[in-house]
Image (tube, rainbow, N blue to C red):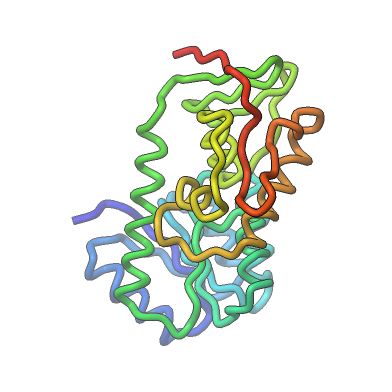
Amino acid sequence: MSEKTVLVIEDDNDIRELIKYNLVREGYRVAEAAHGEDGLTKATSTPCDLILLDLMLPGISGLEICRSLKTAPKTAGIPVIMVTAKGEEADIVVGLELGADDYVVKPFSPKVLMSRVRAVLRRQRTSADATTGATIRFDNLEIHAGKREVLIDGKPIDLTYTEFQILYFLASRPGWVYTRYQIVDAAKGEGYPVTDRAVDVHIVSLRKKLGAYDRLIETIRGVGYRFADQTPEVEE
């Protein structure tokens, strides 16, 4: 039995009960919220390991909740799966850009949803267990895997979970060229639904945050991206 707690923020009572039923059957503890304000309050006050978040909510929208959670240090590390009737590419891109970890479109199969829940929690655990102390340096750019921290000239820069995963993946293998799908597999896990546009959005945002070091992420036309072919300094 799992000891993980999942917060379900969903205004439709029937869908919320369906999600709760399947989570409890899988052994998860469940907290619930039926509107945006209550959801945000519970997300910040109730210890939880994962949030299932509806996009269209009364009060504060799901996108606003996601933005608030991913920009607050206390909740930034909590994975978020958006569960929504909006399946257009633009909505998926916005959700990913804000830091959502996965995206399930209604109507959904409960088996698929539970599979996504397990996959996100597994990635979260693997990420926490892996590369406990390695630091990669390129001049004054430092990428600390264990702390999930990136410094430029000694000052931290604020990256989303996905941006850090992409940067660390590319920087760990300088000179190697990866397709967009290889990059998203490394950052999110195999089989994660994504568009070329979504990967490009993450890369554009990451380059902006890297400032003068944006040159290290190179576009390989017709293929994907690579980190500049330089030899990093690696400390354990």
Residue 37 in which image quadrant: bottom right
Q: Is residue 81 left or right of residue 113?
A: right
Where residue 160 appears, x then y in whole percent?
Answer: 62, 44
Residue at 51 percent across and 67 percent down: it is 103
Q: In the figure, residue 163 lies in which quadrant?
A: top right
Left or right: 70 with respect to 165?
A: right
Q: Which residue extends farthest front? A: 222
- Outermost residue, left side: 1
**Residue in the picture at 67% in, 62% down:** 197
User: Which quadrant of the figure contains the N terminus?
Assistant: bottom left
x and y percent of residue 161 in the render? 56, 44
Position of 121 with respect to 164 (left or right) is left
Asked if residue 115 is positioned above or below residue 15 in the image, the reply reads above
Question: Residue 117: x, y in percent?
Answer: 37, 61
Is residue 213 placed above or below 13 in the rendered structure?
above
Which sits in the foreground, 148 or 42?
148
Is residue 148 found left or right of 48 in the rendered image? right
